[in-house]
Every structure is written in structure tokens, then in C-alpha cells.
Image (tube, grey):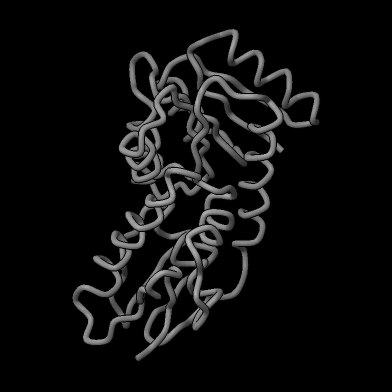
Amino acid sequence: MKILVIEDEKKVANFIKRGLEEEKFEVDTANDGETGLQMAIEGSYCLVILDVMLPKRDGMSVVRELRSRKMMVPVLMLTAKDSLDDIVAGLNSGSDDYLTKPFAFAELLARVRALLRRTELERGAEIRFADLRLDPVTHKVWRKDKEIDLTAKEYALLEFFMRNPNQVLTRTTIAENVWDYVFDSFTNIIDVYVNYLRKKVDRDADKKLIHTARGLGYILKEE
């Protein structure tokens, strides 16, 4: 499996490259955003590890460009910032997960494997709930006949709801399954993303599907 690491700090890039190669991954590296973007577009990668602060083109701009081209390769973003606003901005740009520097290689490896597992699970038959339709292969979503434009993380959250309809999903459960870990003090990021989804999925619909289970979490159901 081939991974692209876009990181301008050569020591960090080499640290990641050596560790992943020891785990039998094939790894390419780029030291600036423009080069990394071109490699991601032209190469066939199963995952991109992307630093936020890069010369020539920043990481958020790179992932937005990939998503605008309908390239759904999983992106793990590396950042020195750990505030809620920074995390939301990174995820909302289209990345699938984030990791704050400095980090242990074991944690990075766990996140890489989790993202690759999810990519494999997403291949499958179309999922339907009420008048919602989701295609795990193309990552497209429709309500009735209208296509809904979602970020990668919004898509992952909606897919989790649709695979678990009529069940109360706690914030911890959502964090563990959609982000693959518990957010601790950042659990309200779940509320932020549920609100994003509601605006896109329910706002113009007669029947609301995403509901709050007070004191518990959220549930996808018809009323």
C-alpha cells in the first residue's frame, strides 16, 4: 500500500517514512504543498499524511483542491495547533482525521490503519433510509433526487447514522467510530458536525431525520 507524506520538516518526514516502511508500506515524500498536491493528483495513493503549515501551498488548501477534484483519498492532517477552532477548520477543509504535533509513531500508525480499514468498509452497496440515499463507492448522497454536497467528515458522520438508524448514538460512540478515538474535552465537535449535517440534510425538507436524544446523543429516525 502506497502512502504520500507531505511535510516540510525533513526530520519529521523521514521519521514517518522510516516507521511506515518498517510496517511494509511504500512511502513517497514531498516537502512543499504544490509538489505534494501534484503528486497526490498524479499518483495512486491509499492515504495522504499532510502537514498544515507548508511552503508554497498550505495543507488546508491542498486537501480542499483534492476534494474539489472528487478525489476521496483519506487524508490525515498534522498540526501544531490543538484548539477546537483549528480542529474544526482542518476537518471541515476535507481531511478525515488530525494528529497534533508532537506525536508518538504508535498513535500515527493506529490512525493510519483505522483510516485504511474504513476505506475498505466503505466499498459496498448503496444505503437508503427514508428518502436519503448514500453511495459508499462514489461518496455521493441524495435526498429525494437532490444531491447533497458534503465534506469528507460530514459524509462519514452521515454514513454512520445511516448504518445505525433508529438507535441513539452517544457522542462517545460517534467519536470512536467516525473519528476512531474519544475527543475528551473536544466532544462538542460532534455537536458542530451534527449541526452542519442538519443544515444540509434537513433544513429544506418537510420531514426532519436527525434528532437530538436529550442528555444522550443523536438518532436518525422518521417521525
Of residues 17 and 214, the one drawn nearer to the viewer in this rendering: 214
User: In the image, 23: left or right of 129?
Assistant: right
Q: Quadrant of the C terminus?
A: bottom left
Residue 91 position by quadrant: top left
Residue 20 position by quadrant: top right
Q: Quadrant of the N terminus?
A: top right
Of residues 208 and 56, the one drawn nearer to the viewer in this rendering: 208
Q: Residue furthest left?
A: 204
Residue drawn at x 34%, y 34% is 86
Q: Can residue 65 be seen by looking at this rendering? A: no
Q: Residue furthest bottom?
A: 223
User: In the image, 87: left or right of 202?
Assistant: right
How many discs mark residues in the rendered view?
0
> In the image, residue 69 lies at what x, y percent?
38, 45
Residue drawn at x 32%, y 83% is 144
User: In the image, 73: left or right of 85?
Assistant: right
Q: Can residue 53 be seen by looking at this rendering? A: yes
Q: Residue furthest front?
A: 215
> In the image, residue 207 lies at what x, y percent?
27, 86
Residue drawn at x 68%, y 25% is 105
> In the image, residue 209 lies at what x, y percent?
35, 80
Of residues 82 and 112, the one drawn nearer to the viewer in this rendering: 82
> In the image, residue 38 lies at what x, y percent?
44, 27
Residue drawn at x 29%, y 68% is 198
